[in-house]
Image: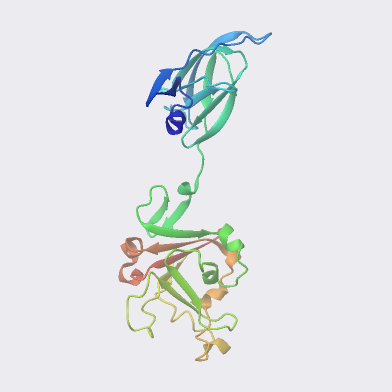
Amino acid sequence: METLQALLKNTDLDCKAVAAMLVVFKKPKEEITPVPGKALINIEGRVIDETGQPLPGITITLQGTQRGTTTNGSGSFSMEQVPENASIIAQGIGFPSQVFTATAMMILRLTRTVSDLDEVQVIAYGTTTRRISTGSVSSLTAKDLATQPVSNPLAAMQGRIPGLIISQTSGIAGSAFKVQLRGQSALDLSLSKNDPLFVIDGVPFEPGNSTTNQLSSAATQPSGGGLSALNLINPADIERIDVLKDADATSIYGSRGANGVILITTKKV
């Protein structure tokens, strides 16, 4: 009963229980109470988006009442006996509710809601969005990095990328990080064959962490594991980090991206 009532909301239909049956019926026409000093008008309108394209299936409701209608395939609608200058609410999937003042002829322009699905993602051969992406890409933006008080961008990714395991090799400041994306593909762990490829501003940095950890310091001792050269990149200068997995990683970089690709994009002036 409650489910059916929810489905019939904002329509001219209602339902009630009769014996063991649910009966759907048309609501009696709502009487319009004239507002002193305001005339009743008939509305003819059209709903379009920000580019001027018509929007079908948009719900149009008279505020404070259950009277409403929906736009047809050309985005047009009509309502009769509406108090002049009354408030009209337009809403639809992907569009926030907006209130308009009723006039005889109306053009309602709705702006789409920008969601996380429309966020730009960097891939090996260009850019895309989460809405149309068919691959496996995870991203971190400058806003995410700003909340992490770290000196190495790899540390900011810890626990934020699905399937990415990051662990520091020692407790020495600036020491190297072990990076593993979706498990390991080689049994020989000494040659860093399980590390992803790092690409900074479109330039391949190196195919693993082995040559990254070559800066001289106390961390280069056997117990330290090396010093990460990515410490030389200020996290505040990074615009976004995109992690490519599977076919997204190997589509351009081939076998070098067999363990995934980490794309670091810095901010431009």
Residue that sits furthest to the right in the current view = 37
Q: 211 above or below 58?
A: below
Q: How many marks?
A: 0
Q: Is residue 36 above or below residue 87?
A: above
- Furthest residue to the bottom? 222
- Which residue is more in the foreground, 148 or 217? 148
x, y percentage for residue 8?
Answer: 44, 26
Relative image position of residue 79 (x, y in whole percent): 50, 15
Residue 217 is at least partly visible in this image: no
Image quadrant where one finds the C terminus = bottom right
Report which quarter residue 54 is drawn in: top left
Residue that appears at 49% across and 82% down: 213
Instruction: Name the residue at 38% across, 68% down.
Output: 260
Q: Nearer the viewer, residue 201 or 180?
A: 180
Residue 31 rendering spot, x and y as whole percentages: 55, 11
Q: Is residue 44 left or right of residue 36?
A: left
Does residue 258 lie above or below 174 as drawn? above
Quarter residue 38 falls in: top right
Coloring scheme used: rainbow
Q: Does residue 173 appear anywhere in the picture?
A: yes
Give the residue furthest to the front: 19
Where is residue 179? Give x, y as percent: 45, 74
Which quarter of the rendering shows the N terminus?
A: top left
The residue at 52%/74% (across/down) is 230
